[in-house]
Image (spheres, rainbow, N blue to C red):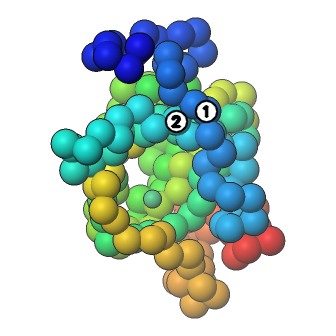
Amino acid sequence: MADSPIRKAQPGFRWEGVETLRYKDEGSAPFRDVTRQVLFHEGDLHCEWRYFEVAPGGYSTLERHRHAHAVMILRGRGHCLVGERVHAVAAHDLVTVPPLAWHQFRADADSPLGFLCLVNKDRDRPQLPDARALAALRRVPEVAAFIRTGDEAGG
Ligand code: MN
């Protein structure tokens, strides 16, 4: 299989030879019910292509960093925060996360949210919001509602 350029799709948004990993180490940052698959990580590319899946009601970490993300929703429905706006997203929508924009993805309660995420191979570590950043984000009512769970500060 290592010789083949093809890794076949398998049922359930999985691919031959691709491991389903934890999204992040438990306790390193707040998130709920997210898996990660690294689809492309070859030496000749200066980027990585990952597939994340958020289970119904789950969410990715609220974070920001200098590197950008190019995202295509591949499965399901949910909402994403980018900067100071919350957007409904569904399969095949494209999402641009610019440098230093706060961002978070949430699956709807009754749907998973799976998305492809293209990212630089060399990239800075995500920053989590401190109390001041959270207070600033919460000044926008729709953002306050979006980050409502109360565990975004590390609990
Ligand atoms: Mn990110």
Disc 2 + disc 1, Cβ < 8 Å:
yes
Circle on res. 117: none
Image vertical order of residue 129 relative to residue 5, above or below: below
Q: Quadrant of residue 39?
A: top left
- Label 2 crowding class (10 Å Cα cut-off): few <14, some 14-19, many 20+? many
How far from the left and from the top, in percent, is residue 57?
A: 73, 41
How far from the left and from the top, in percent, is residue 15?
A: 49, 19
Q: Residue at x 56, y 40 (%)?
A: 36
Residue wearing tag 2: 37
Q: Amino acid at mark 2?
A: Gln
- Residue 139 appears anywhere in the view: no
Element carrying mark 2: strand
Q: Residue at x 72, y 50 (%)?
A: 32
How far from the left and from the top, in percent, is residue 13?
A: 54, 19
Residue wearing tag 1: 20
Give the quadrant of the C terminus.
Answer: bottom right
Which of 24/7 is in front? 7
- Residue 141 appears anywhere in the view: yes
Q: Amino acid at mark 1?
A: Thr
Q: Quadrant of residue 148?
A: bottom right
Element carrying mark 1: loop
Q: Quadrant of residue 3?
A: top left
The residue most toward the bottom is 132
- Label 1 crowding class (10 Å Cα cut-off): few <14, some 14-19, many 20+? some
